[in-house]
Amino acid sequence: MTSLEPAAATRPSGAATLGPPPAGGPGGGRALRLALVSEHASPLAALGGVDAGGQNVHVAKLAGALADRGHHVVVYTRRDDPELPERVALRPGVEVRHVPAGPAEQVPKDTLLPYMDDFGDWMARQWRTRPPDLVHSHYWMSGLAALRAVRAAGLPLVHTYHALGAVKRRHQGEADTSPAERVEREREVGLGCDRIVATCHDEVFELSMMRVPVEKAGIVPCGVDTEQFRPDGPSAPRTGGLPHRLVQLGRLVPRKGAAVALAALGRLPDTELLIVGGPPADRVDADPEVRKLREEARLAGVADRVRFTGGVPPHEVAPLLRSADVVLCPADYEPFGIVPLEAMACGRPVVASAVGGQLDTVADPATGRLVPPRDPEALAAAVADLLADPALRASCGAAGRRRVLSRYGWGRVAAATEREYAAVLAARRAVTGAA
């Protein structure tokens, strides 16, 4: 079963899938004024923190790719620093607006809900004089703020969840810090918006379990920059002197599965593991999660073969991935997961847990291996097979690059997103009779 062909028993029949991109933009190629709402995930944020990761990249890259197609995009995100200007030009055609909602300081995203009414009211006031043609909210709290604003202005709303509270609660249990009302408010957004742009089949299935009509959902995956992430280019040096290197990249939070990777490493001799992400390198030693993982590495007898790089600048990510023999993505759960795409774009095989969006992106056995989550033995066995066969690694890497180019480039993702916008605008025109 390939990653884009989930079991028929679990795929909701009403969900649209990613098809060929449209020949032109919505409305016969008309340039649109688009509002992207991303309350906690600013496209300007430094990546690697607890609340800064794939959504930040997605919003920034989608905005840029839509601008490349002739649209004007404004990204609305919360002001979390008093020194931030109200407007920042991210690139031609893309502007970031900092919304005054809550204190102008860093606030954990799970405590932002009380400020979403102010966020929505501020946007509604801005849109009285120059409304966008369409609003696309990202994450559930952005959806609540956007829903409040579009109801006041009578605007169409498209929503992307990026993660669902029911899934988080199922996997994290009492460790889940989300507001208690998250799941019900997510359902409110799903019922209130015009269209849902889901990122994978598993997400649509979860929405059906929430009693959100699946016919409202289309599937458009996250994308990857195929020029930044490519097989040729500089590779980070190997200094450990061992024959093989594994790389795990992502936020240093327990659900990303670094502890599983450490346990698997004990079954993989002559192999080093780079864990990339978390605080900057000069603060990594003081990080509580790093200290915990180092102790687990010591107990597993692999401390001398593990290196924590801390967070790295974006331009260093591709060289680190290119330096790997295999890239690990062993998350307990993963709403989508951009790292497998980045690794595949760099021509590297991926061993990932068979969860969430990774079921769509990683084609087992063509581009790598899918293994059960939280299973160090299965992870080690899959990695060992790849490390023992250089030709197999090269074949998987080449297949991964082809897969990314055919499905996940940002130009294709933006075109497919346009198609979802066009469907919403056409439906609105059919109801209102507007030109």
Image: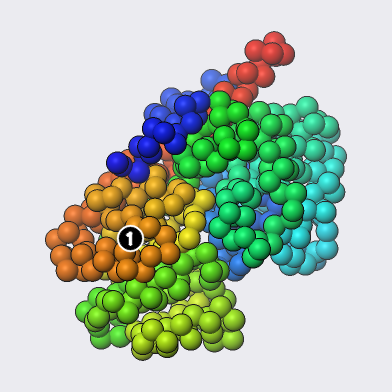
Horizontally, residue 192 falls left or right of residue 56, namely: right
Q: Which residue is mark 1?
A: 351
Q: Which residue corresponds to the image point at 43% horizontal and 25% vertical from the top-left?
A: 23
Residue 371 in view (yes/no): yes
The 10 Å Cα crowd at callout 1, few under 14, some 14 to 19, many 20 or more, is: many
Q: Say which residue appears at 78% left-offset and 27% top-offset.
A: 154
Element type at marker 1? strand
Which residue sits at x=54%, y=84%?
291
Q: Is residue 23 above or below residue 285?
A: above
Find residue 385 and report its horizontal and vertical position in percent: 20, 64
Percent of width and height locating residue 99: 78, 52
Q: Is residue 33 left or right of residue 379?
A: right
Q: Who is closer to the viewer here, 395 or 184? A: 184
Q: Which one is nearer the viewer's eye here, 148 or 335?
A: 335
Number of numbered tags placed on the structure image: 1
Q: Quadrant of the N terminus?
A: top left
Quadrant in the rendering for residue 105? bottom right
Q: Is residue 261 above or below residue 17?
A: below
Residue 100, how many percent across, how many down?
Answer: 82, 55
**Colour basis:** rainbow
Q: Is residue 307 above or below residue 60?
A: below
Q: Is residue 143 visible?
A: no
- The three-letter amino acid code for the residue at tag 1 is Val
Quarter of the image with the C terminus in it: top right
Q: State the residue in front, 295 or 97.
A: 295
Q: Position of residue 232 (x, y in %)?
A: 27, 61
Determine the residue positioned at 39% across, 32% down.
8
